[in-house]
Amino acid sequence: MLKVLYSLSWGSYPLAASHRMEIALALVSALLFALGSVLAQRAALGEARAGPSSSLLLRMARRPLWLAGTAADALGFVAQAGALGAGRLAVVQPLLVTAVVFALPLGVWLTEQRLHRNEVVAAALVVIALGGFLLIATPSGGRGDAPVSAWLIAILACAVACAPLAALGRAGPARRRAALLGTSTGILFALSAALTKAVVDRLGGGVLHVVAGWELYALILVGYVSMTLNQLALATGALAAAVATSTALDPIVSVILGLTVFDEALHASGPRAAGTVGCLVAALGGMVVLARQQSDSVAA
């Protein structure tokens, strides 16, 4: 899978080490996130009724598989940060969608899940569509030192979008609550990725430069709120709606933030613009199918 996406997207980039690095690290990050998710799922099998939920985290922390999954997630975040530092938000975050593709063979191998034909077709669609997006749109440009004014507009826009979604997601049918909370989660995941890129950029000036900047503390705050909303979305029980909406909104908002905050560019006009949008829609459609299937497996 790594080889397929790497070769599909290669024609859109000059042979520069930074371009190779952002694609490779983004795919490695997606693989590690998928591994962490599957290992956590494997560790949680049979745990739902084994004692009070209040002590669930402590019980899971005694399981080597759960700890391995947590370590994989941590390494995935490091790889994501490296990819964002080396490349563009409009490239890295869409490529992280492949985590739901990597989870398929890992789930078959580690949790003995059955692989269905529609999942294989959806996975192929995601890979081909993402490769098409990189080939057609050829994301380029970008800056690491975005002005504060651009950040204020972006953060305010995300807050204005997420606040009513989070409020409306506290009542009503479970499916609707999961979709609303998942949507706000996906928006904040994208904002967290953008702030991670900013923090990594400041890291070039040393640790003190990072500590002295506002981006680190904004990342901690946004990360905390996004994870809280994600847990609330999952707690509704409508896993498919929660996972699909959060995973779909993340790459969409990330592309927007890349274009507006970091001054990245998509070389798509006329028919190429239609092809770019079509590829993103196709990739997200395949991802939604995979998210629904995997959420149903977790629920079962």
Image: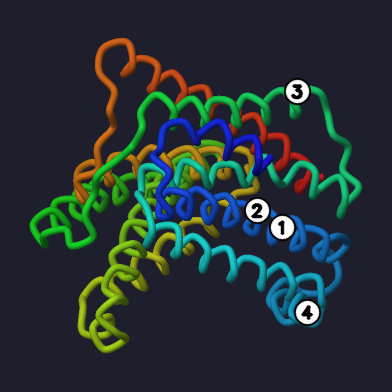
- Mark 2 vs 1: CB contact within 8 A: yes
Badge 2 is on which residue?
31
Residue sitting at the far right: 112
Nearest to N terminus: mark 2 or mark 4? 2
Q: Residue type at mark 1: give it.
A: Leu
Residue shown at 62% from the left, 47% from the top: 99
Residue 183 point in image, percent of width and height = 43, 42
Badge 1 is on which residue?
35
Tell me if I can see residue 169 in this picture: no
Whole-number angstrom distance, CA of label 2 to CA of label 4 = 26 Å
Nearest to N terminus: mark 2 or mark 3? 2
Badge 3 is on which residue?
118
Give me the disc on residue 59.
4
Residue sitting at the far bottom: 208
- Left or right of residue 23: residue 198: left
- Mark 2 vs 3: CB contact within 8 A: no
Q: Residue type at mark 2: give it.
A: Leu
Estimate how packed mark 4 is, as few (under 14), some (14 to 19) or many (20 or more) residues with alpha carbons within 10 Å: some
Estimate how packed mark 1 is, as few (under 14), some (14 to 19) or many (20 or more) residues with alpha carbons within 10 Å: many
